Amino acid sequence: MAKKEVKKIVLAYSGGLDTSIILKWLKNEYGCEVITFSADLGQGDELDPIRDKAIATGADKVYIDDLKEEFVRDFVFPMFRANALYEGHYLLGTSIARPLIAKRQMEIAAIEGADAVSHGATGKGNDQVRFELGYYHFNPAITVIAPWRDWKLNSRQALIAYAKKNDIPIPITKKRPWSSDRNLLHISFEGGILEDTWAEPPENMFVLTKAPEKAPNKPQFVEVEFRNGNAVAVDGEKMSPAQLLAHLNYIGGEHGIGRVDLLENRSVGMKSRGVYETPGGTILREAHMAVEQITMDREVMRVRDSLIPEYARMIYAGYWFSPEREMLQTLIDDSQKCVNGVARVKLYKGHCRTVGRKSDTDSLFNLDFATFEKDQVYNQKDAEGFIKINSLRLRIRSLMHASRKK
């Protein structure tokens, strides 16, 4: 296919192997201005060399934007109000970051008058879908350049050879034979030695968490306060969304909380192994569910919970900006109006569990009704009629079966 003429490209740039090569490739293949954009979502010192590296590799202009507060406030917290979990394990740390990156990338494209955007996602992965659905949401006419679907560099070896030929530093070595992606919610690992699904991930791979067996021998108790379903304080100290998640990451990491080894189903149809560290997110979800237990109506919770798998699938598959996700978010957020209270969570050697929950304003726990001691408000005789009504269809079914046997 002939290349479409473009005048200016904004590239989502991480500074890793793929996007470093893509930057040079775009300059070589399109011969136009290329602007790099890197989102600071909590990668730590990984961003320190980004600007110099981008300029050295050919970038005409560099954006590095601190989006940490927006990331947690407008993307992570809404997702956690739903207790979203993909395939029973994955807290969607990479998935939820992509819509924000796409959003800001398109804002930069508009500011700079760029007519094209590019990313480093492969043609086998989920991120190509997540990025591009976001791009088209903001500008249906934008030109999207996805090098992994166009070039002939179809292996890591080919990429490394291209990097050496063009004097691009290679961040992946024999001592680090996997790729990773980090933000405030998690860090993910995939590829390389992890493609052996029988092999345990090496301990030196993990970044955010101590090995559970090397974690402190004494448990730590953490109190997380929620207002309208959002965490607002830890151990009585008010914090901004990003500060709070970073704080929980540190505490959880010290106790080996939040490691996941998952063979997941990618959107394109194949299975892929992902290893994740999500210490703060694991604590946050446990604490949020604990406060919901004491404040949320049973039937509201049942309806909301029935929608979680679909909501999580939407985020995983890149449909954050879709009308169906927005519709579900409205329902989910309405269910959170009463989720006000504090959860007490115990952390010990990789385990995170609730040991207490309370709500001064919205508790639905009524000791007068729930007690096993003598009470004046509940007539136990009433349960007989309740059981008979609820068993009616079962009794009719049994009678029909019995009559057929005669």
Image (tube, grey):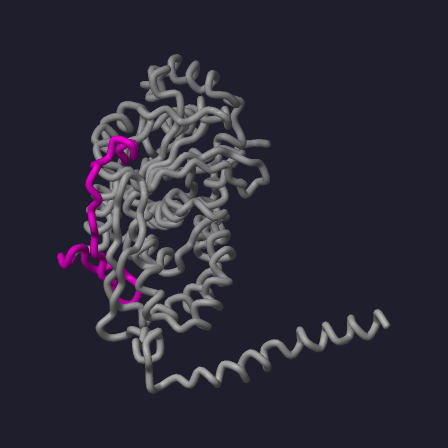
Which quadrant is the N terminus positioned in? Answer: top right
**Is residue 112 visible to the viewer in this orientation of the structure?**
yes
Residue 366 vs residue 59, the one in the foreground: 366
Q: Provide the residue span drawn in magenta.
A: 209-238
Residue for point 27% across, 23% down: 56
User: Residue lying farthest right?
Assistant: 406
Residue 370 drawn at (x, y percent): 35, 75
What x and y, as percent, mark residue 312?
A: 46, 53
Picture coordinates of residue 302, whole percent (x, y): 47, 67
Question: Can residue 12 be seen?
Answer: no
Determine the residue located farthest toward the front in the rendered image: 374
Q: Farthest left residue? A: 237
Query: In which quarter of the view is residue 138 placed?
Result: bottom left
Vertical relation: 87 (above or below) 187? below
393 vs 203, left or right, is right
User: Which residue is located at x 40 percent, y 25 percent?
Assistant: 178
The image shows residue 34 at horizontal and vertical percentages of: 35, 34
**Against 98, is 341 above or below?**
below
Q: Could you tell me how many numbered marks the image carries?
A: 0
252 left or right of 318? Answer: left
Q: The C terminus lies in which quarter of the figure?
A: bottom right
Look at the image and say whether residue 220 sits in the magenta stretch: yes
